Amino acid sequence: MSAASRRYRRLLAALAVALVASALLAVAVGAVWISPVDAARLIAWKLGLSARPPVPHSTEVILFQLRLPRVLLAGVVGAALAASGLVFQGLFRNPLADPAIVGVSSGAALGAVAVIVLGGAGALGGYGVPLAAFVGALLAAFLVFRLARIGPTVHVATLLLAGIAVAAIISAVISLLMSFSGEEVRSIYRWLLGGLQARGWTSLWQVVPLVLLGMAAAALTAHELNVVSLGEERAAQLGVEVDRLKRRAVAVGSLLAAAAVSVAGVIGFVGLMTPHVLRLIVGADHRRLLPAVLLAGPTLLILADLVARVALAPEELPVGAITALLGGPFFLFLLRRERKAAGARA
Amino acid sequence: MPGPESFVVLEGVTAGYGATPVVQDVSLSVAAGEVVGLVGPNGSGKTSLIRAASRALRPSAGRVMIGGRDPYALSAREAARMVAVVPQDLHPAFSFTALEMVLLGRSPYLSPWGGGGAADWARARDAMAATEVQHLADRPIDELSGGERRRVILSQALAQDAPALLLDEPTTHLDLRHVLDLLGVVRALAERQDKAVLAVLHDLNLASSACDRLVVLHRGRVVAEGEPQDVVTADLLGSVWGVEAEVRPSEATGRPAVLLGPPRGVPAPLGRGAHIIGGAGRGAPLMRRLAERGYDVSAGVLHGTDTDAFVAERLNLVRVTVPPFSSIDQESAAECRALIAAADLLLVCDAPFGPGNVANLDLALEAARGGTRTILLEQIPIDERDFTGGAAAERWRALRDLAAVVRTYEDVMAEVG
């Protein structure tokens, strides 16, 4: 085994350990402290691996009804956002691209806001908002993709412009809807900020199949994303049907992002930061990046959500604000680094 | 015509972007084991032709055949197993290592996940050995020198294992040493692995020494084709590239070598005028050369859609033009007479003469009899281009007695002094 692949395996192991550790930490910390040992033993019992440990019933309730679904949801959403970011960065051949670029986030927001304003938030057994958000996200992505298409070809530059234009129009519509709404403004606002609170197991079961599907499709797209990062014409010369790849990558990235946004609202920067940092360590190969991203994205969002919960307890902060607080400076740091590197080359 | 062993065949290919074709009615073929050079000035359609042959620019007329199959009827994957393209340069968006770059060349054989077997690794290693870049395997591509990067790109195309290899100016911006090494690798591929190689080359000397045959493109059409010694001539350099050059066999290779004249500055005005009577494009090369020498060049009477009229317009010459297929009217003849009178020198080219332009010969005779210094270009005998039933030939012979008669454009320029 070469030194590079030994290093890669060590990195994956370290990321896996970090993920488990951050999940146990997030499960443990809160208004009621649950020791990670008790948590692990309770989970083992639930999985039928051991006898029920001697812990109070209230601990069991808090763990299984509040902490665990929330941590798992944070993990799934983090994985979806990070994988979506990887796919879009590969497709746009730009390390600063993220899911918001193709209008997915704003489309989801419009869907959710429309349902809340129309009073349908409680419809469909509580699924109204996430479902509307999911549909809105996919519709926006589809619209952007159609607008960006010239003949059979989708140009990356027109895709970016169409994304910006559609997002601007959608935000305007959202503002209009909000000005027509009364007391719902606060709940709309909370949704737009993004959050994982009190979603329970139903949200989790709702997104897991979509995210698994998206991950599998991302895995099958990873190699072609490698080829297309040489440029579209070169990719075609190397046997890639470029137009088909672009359609598939937009569909996969949008599906993952829409699934995440539908249950957690708009959470920025996870999709941007995770692939970018890992690329510095792992290299450019999307096939090697994907597993790393799927381990690191959940860790990042689980920790961010933990901070959101406990920083000003009992008040909860919107997790989107935490990732933005982390991500904004990070983004600026990257920009500075790029400029320095460019300066050094010049 | 393509022989049975021709692997890459283009038949009457017309292709371009939008309504204007960039290449028109181009036919060429490359046999297995042969290196064919595609040469021509900037904008002559070389890159477009490579794109048409590599399934990137569908011809609007004619057809492309690779190994007997139409690449446009194949999937991208199947086509990539038949034809490998070596682009001028590549700057990947992300920093792949050299080995990863070369492995991407195996794409047409890999599973959707991109998994490859030991055979794919072996092919990638072989391809890197062929261009001597094995030692760079773990280096990021964006840290390599230009020459190293080009060799990695060539190995990527070699890893594709395709029997046809199309190269688009693979040597641009390379050091002399790297240029020769790279072309050496390409020659070896044709000779030892029987690859059919079509290479766009900018440098005529390189093309002449590295290729078995050359195809010269000019304004989207093939204007010459054959072995280098038959194709690379001073005449061709003049008429296609518009440069004056000396061509003689290289002592090292026996192939024609081009020695360019001195760089041309802005021509100093001579304060002397020359009038050109052309037609059917025969006058165009002289218009440019005389203008470059500093003459005030005028031309006429020209017919609207003639190449000479087009070139005269491009060079912004003073000229008299009549509509296509019309005869020369009195007024045009009078204006042209004035232009000839103002010139110090009259050049009459060996254009075809018919009822539409025979009046030009009357103007020439009139001027020659009046003492204007006259040079007659006669590469083509008058009998082959007299469409007036003898009237033009009679005037031409009268002109011969009054003028200096020369055979080539070079001789005209020598005579002009």
Image (tube, rainbow, N blue to C red):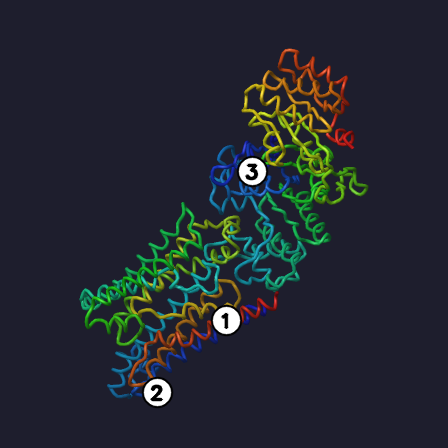
Amino acid, disc 2: Ser
Q: Which percent across, then down, holds residue B341?
A: 69, 25
Locate residue A105: give its quadrant.
bottom left
Question: Which label belongs to residue B67?
Answer: 3
Which residue is at a point 38% across and 64% down the rendered structure image? A100
Residue neighbourhood size for the residue with mark 3, other residues' Cα within 10 Å, grouped as few (<14), some (14–19), many (≥20): some
Question: Most extreme residue toward the top, as rendered?
Answer: B389
Q: Which residue is mark 1?
A: A334
Q: Which percent across, then down, holds residue B256?
A: 76, 38
Amino acid, disc 3: Gly
Q: Are marks 1 and 3 on the same chain?
A: no
Helix, strand or loop for disc 2: loop
Q: Nearer the viewer, mark 1 or mark 2?
A: 1
Q: CA distance from mark 1 to mark 2?
A: 38 Å
Along the line of sight, the residue nearer the viewer: B126 or B377: B377
Mark 1 — on which chain does it sit?
Answer: A
Q: Are marks 1 and 3 in contact (CB under 8 Å)?
A: no
Which residue is at a point 59% across and 49% down the rendered structure image? B86
Q: Which residue is mark 2?
A: A35
Helix, strand or loop for disc 3: loop
Considering only order in the chain, which callout, 2 or 1, is on the residue closer to the N terminus? 2
Residue neighbourhood size for the residue with mark 1, other residues' Cα within 10 Å, grouped as few (<14), some (14–19), many (≥20): some
Q: CA distance from mark 3 to mark 2?
A: 70 Å
Would residue B33 be seen by someone viewing this image from the given angle?
A: no
Above or below, comparing residue A58 to residue A274 in the picture: below
Q: Are marks 3 and 2 in contact (CB under 8 Å)?
A: no
Q: Quadrant of the C terminus of chain A?
A: bottom right
